[in-house]
């Protein structure tokens, strides 16, 4: 079966071996974050509709999961904001009923939890990982570049409302953009907001893959350590780079399209692709060279590392 809505599995720094589930087309989102690894938002919207048919997503998941792959999570994320798809609840309820052995995680920018229907649909996940990168309007606009109708105060209220209703686990991700949201004033606001939301864990993240804007740089490790204090007494985890692991994919099934589909949603290095696919460096390099020559993908550098992403 040709897969267009699911991708991977990949090794996630936070979720282990993860099969990606893409609920929208590239790149439909309520934000246009300066650090997003999927590139600039092409459709900035708050409109909820079935951007990708739920029937198609369910068919792909059924075909893949009936083989019984070893996965840590089925992770809803990918090209844009998954909660924009009105079929989200149907898909996750199907998984809960038909494939209950697999844990379900949601990567979300957290902007739509002010809507009761979104909170209700997301209650079916085992783990929800929303973002909160700013509290003040100025920094919210600078880092997240939101849809004009988004009110960050309402976004935070929505996250707090979800926490009160939701019985699962919430890891609140805060992406640090040096020189923008790492001032003492903004960090104090973020700490206050996080304590009001009451997540099970705060996760501090910074640039590891190419972002949308070249001016965004990674935060230094000592800087991240100094930020932890602003979130006391909440548990805080600093997200670190993944180490090498055995292959995840069936080597015989790896094609140029497999690789193109992956890097379109998750920019990766040559070494990461070779490791996941069980290919030699030369084999992976040959595929990547052919894809870049045909302009199906592009390559670019971040901090001396070459990444491959959407063309």
Image (cartoon, rainbow, N blue to C red):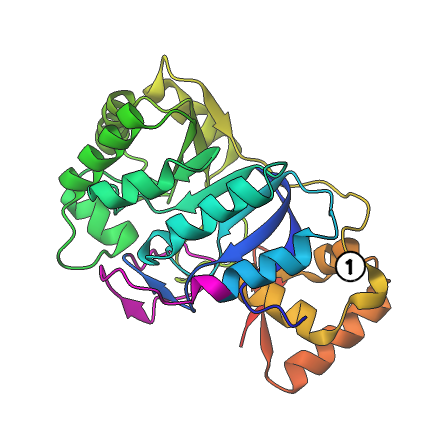
Q: Mark 1: which secondary structure?
A: helix
What is the x, y in percent for residue 132? 31, 39
Asked whether 153 or 181 is in front, the reply is 153
What is the x, y in percent for residue 224? 45, 30
Residue 215 lies left or right of residue 289; in this view the side is left
* Magenta-tinted stretch: 31-55
Q: Is residue 86 above or below residue 129?
A: below
- Residue at the image point whose x is 38% and y is 24% from the top: 167
What is the x, y in percent for residue 35? 40, 54
Q: Residue furthest top?
A: 233
- The residue singled out by tag 1 in the image is 277
What is the x, y in percent for residue 260? 63, 71
Q: Residue furthest front?
A: 97
* Rendered image quadrant of residue 54: bottom left
Is residue 72 shown in magenta? no
- Residue at the image point whose x is 25% and y is 47% from the top: 112
Q: Is residue 159 visible?
A: yes
Residue 302 lies left or right of residue 132; in this view the side is right
Q: Is residue 305 visible?
A: no
């Amino acid at each position: 079966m040709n897969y267009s809505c699911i991708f991977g599995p990949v090794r996630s720094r936070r979720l282990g071996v993860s099969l990606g589930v893409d609920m929208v087309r590239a790149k439909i989102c309520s934000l246009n974050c300066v650090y997003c690894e999927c590139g600039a938002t092409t459709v900035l919207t708050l409109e909820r509709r079935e951007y990708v048919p739920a029937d198609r997503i369910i068919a792909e998941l059924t075909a893949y999961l009936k083989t019984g792959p070893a996965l840590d999570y089925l992770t809803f994320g990918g090209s844009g904001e998954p909660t924009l798809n009105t079929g989200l609840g149907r898909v996750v309820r199907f998984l809960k009923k038909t494939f209950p052995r697999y844990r379900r995680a949601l990567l979300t920018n957290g902007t739509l939890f002010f809507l009761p229907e979104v909170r209700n649909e997301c209650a079916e996940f085992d783990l929800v990982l929303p973002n909160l990168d700013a509290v003040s309007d100025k920094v919210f606009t600078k880092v997240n570049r939101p849809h004009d109708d988004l009110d960050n105060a309402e976004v935070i209220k929505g996250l707090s409302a979800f926490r009160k209703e939701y019985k699962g686990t919430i890891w609140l991700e805060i992406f640090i953009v040096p020189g923008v949201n790492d001032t003492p004033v903004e960090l104090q606001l973020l700490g206050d907001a996080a304590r009001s939301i009451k997540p099970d864990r705060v996760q501090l993240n910074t640039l590891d893959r190419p972002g949308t804007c070249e001016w965004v740089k990674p935060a230094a490790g000592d800087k991240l350590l100094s930020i932890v204090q602003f979130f006391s007494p909440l548990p805080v985890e600093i997200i670190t780079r993944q180490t090498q692991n055995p292959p995840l994919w069936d080597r015989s099934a790896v094609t140029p399209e497999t690789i193109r589909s992956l890097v379109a949603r998750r920019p990766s290095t040559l070494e990461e692709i070779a490791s996941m696919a069980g290919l030699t460096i030369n084999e992976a390099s040959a595929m990547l060279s052919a894809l870049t020559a045909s302009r199906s993908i592009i390559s670019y550098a971040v901090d001396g590392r070459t990444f491959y992403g959407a063309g």
